[in-house]
Image: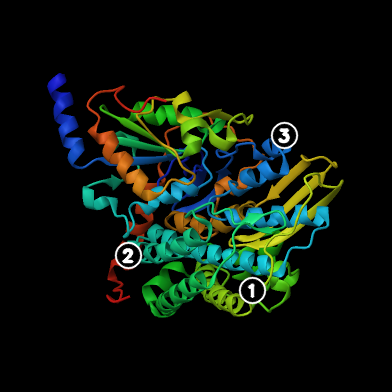
Amino acid sequence: MDLIRKASQWASGKSPWILHFNAGACNGCDIEVVDCVTPRYDLERFGVVKQGSPRHADVLICTGAVTLQTRDRLKQIYEQMPEPKRVIAVGTCACTGGVFDGCYCVTGGIDTVIPVDVYVPGCAVRPDEIISAVERALSLKTDGEGDKK
Amino acid sequence: MADDNKVIIPIGPQHPSLDEPASFTVTLSGERVDNVVIGIGYNHRGLEKACESRTYVQDLYIVERVCGICSHSHTSAFCMGVEQLAGVTVPDRAEYIRAIVAELERLHSHLLWLGVAGHEIGFDTLFMYTWRDREKVLDLLAAIGGNRINYSVNTFGGVRRDLDESIFAKITATLNELEKQINYYLELAQTELTLKARLSGIGCLSKEDALKFGATGPVLRAAGVAQDIRTAEPYGAYKNFEVNVITHTAADVFGRTAVRILEMLESIRIIRHCIKEMPEGAILAKVPRRIPEGEVIVRMEAPRGENIHYIRSNGTDKPDRIRVRAPSEANWHGMQHMLKGEYLADVPISIAAIDPCYSCTDRAITVNSDGTRKVTDWQSIRKYGIDWYKKRGLDMADIRLERGV
């Protein structure tokens, strides 16, 4: 088991596939996540591919304060992802709930629902920071080694 | 499978290309869409309520985050409302700076849309081209406000930062480059037969229907209705000069594309005019912390259409009620009508063509999601659409873009 884990970690480090999920963001961070794959930043030159299905994803990029409507969906997506999986919370809302913390329809940051490995604060986060967060998430060897809140 | 050989396809709510959650339940008979049930509300954060429990200055911060794409439009509308209630006159220079930022925002929003539309029909080269050009606009916005998104230029009584000659020079230079690009996209849309064949005759919303369903912005103008708040009810700097309202008669996705591209050229003209006529003077008027009792409705033209803010004040430093009617919310109503009778292959681009923005829309809508159905993702429905047209001889890969542009 350990060997398989090591092998898949080695492989995903070469060409990680990222999945983006908007858990109730204002669209600002989401646009910057898409910006990462466009010519100026071009995440694809590192082998990073943005794709649709959680079953193929290595890294989950989450934006937004989690709303009650998206909470179950977020959990579902996380569970569908294969091991080893990494979660990046992009934006202040995703880290702590930000300006929407305390709203009746918001549960708070991403870590209130699923474990988060890397936190990227900012409103909105710049694409450079997202790229560096992806790189950092992939360098993590074990679960629980990531950012502490 | 439902009765009468009808197939029900649930799509979403998680899909990669629209970047925001929404679900669609499409009922098909054969390949034609019989009915669509639209499920929105995934992005409802309860920010109207949040505004009521905070002061006006804090609300400005929240209102900016209604939507990350048209953040300036929302703060402009909110500021105009509060200024009207407080009886404050905004200095002319501040109005012109607001107009410049608003038009830059329209440029970046329309370029973004053009890219997304290209992506939905399988024309990813266009997506890369327009998003590359959009970066130039974001650079300008970052130079003006210090942030690429949520630039918070507005404050009550004016703007936070003054613009100087060096920024004007930068804007002028970038606009010259952009104008060349946008003219090229216009030429592409008008002359490229593959593109025209793919976009014409789908997502139709006639003039009567557009009015009936209360569509706004480019969707309404593409149906031939010359409605633009900048000319219908001029506000701010727009009182001082004419804005040419762009309309089209096609009333379909192609019409909306043409309207948006031409609007970008108009925005460039307006920014140039604002820089030339920029008045001297202060950029900020003093606004009291307590806003006098009263209520106000403000209308303004956001990139996606008419943006309405309602503010009721009870004489304290906190608002009594705030209501945001974002343009995307108005455009959703015609969607069901637009999609009925369409091919399934046309559903993605038809939905994308209204430039939907869920974070704007999701104010107070309840959606029941059982979360147990097998759900098709947006990516596969998009791919289906692209392949469907490829089989019929419409392949976007056939379009050759000029290298140098």
Which image quarter: residue A82? top left
Given the image, on which type of amino acid does mark 3 rest?
A: Ser
- Specify the subunit that label 1 lies on: B
The residue sitting at 31% across, 60% down in the picture is A39
Q: Chain of mark 3?
A: B
- Do we see residue A51 in this rendering? no
Query: Disc 3 and disc 2: Cα gap in Å?
Result: 46 Å
Residue picked out by circle 3: B53
Residue at position x 37%, y 62% from top? B127
Residue B200 locus on image (x, y percent):
48, 70
Nearer the N terminus, badge 2 or badge 1? 2
Q: CA distance from mark 1 to mark 3?
A: 42 Å
User: Which residue sits furthest top?
Assistant: A1
- Disc 1 and disc 3 on one polypeptide chain: yes
Q: Secondary structure at mark 3?
A: loop
Give percent across and percent down for residue B32: 48, 54
Chain to which the residue tagged by mark 2 belongs? B
Query: Foreground residue, A24 or B257?
Result: A24
Tell me where residue B157 appears, x and y as whole percent.
Answer: 72, 57
Does residue B81 lie above or below B107 as drawn?
above
Tell me, for residue B102, which label it has, or none: none
Q: Is residue B376 left or right of residue A101?
A: left
Q: Is residue A78 above or below residue B131?
A: above
Residue drawn where x is 72% and y is 66% of the image: B91
User: What label does residue B125 carry, if any?
Assistant: 2
Work out whether mark 3 precedes mark 2 in sequence or the reverse, and give the earlier one.
3
Q: Quadrant of residue B368?
A: top right
Q: Amino acid at mark 1?
A: Gly
Q: Please identify the quadrant where the N terminus of chain A is shown.
A: top left
The residue to which callout 1 is attached is B224
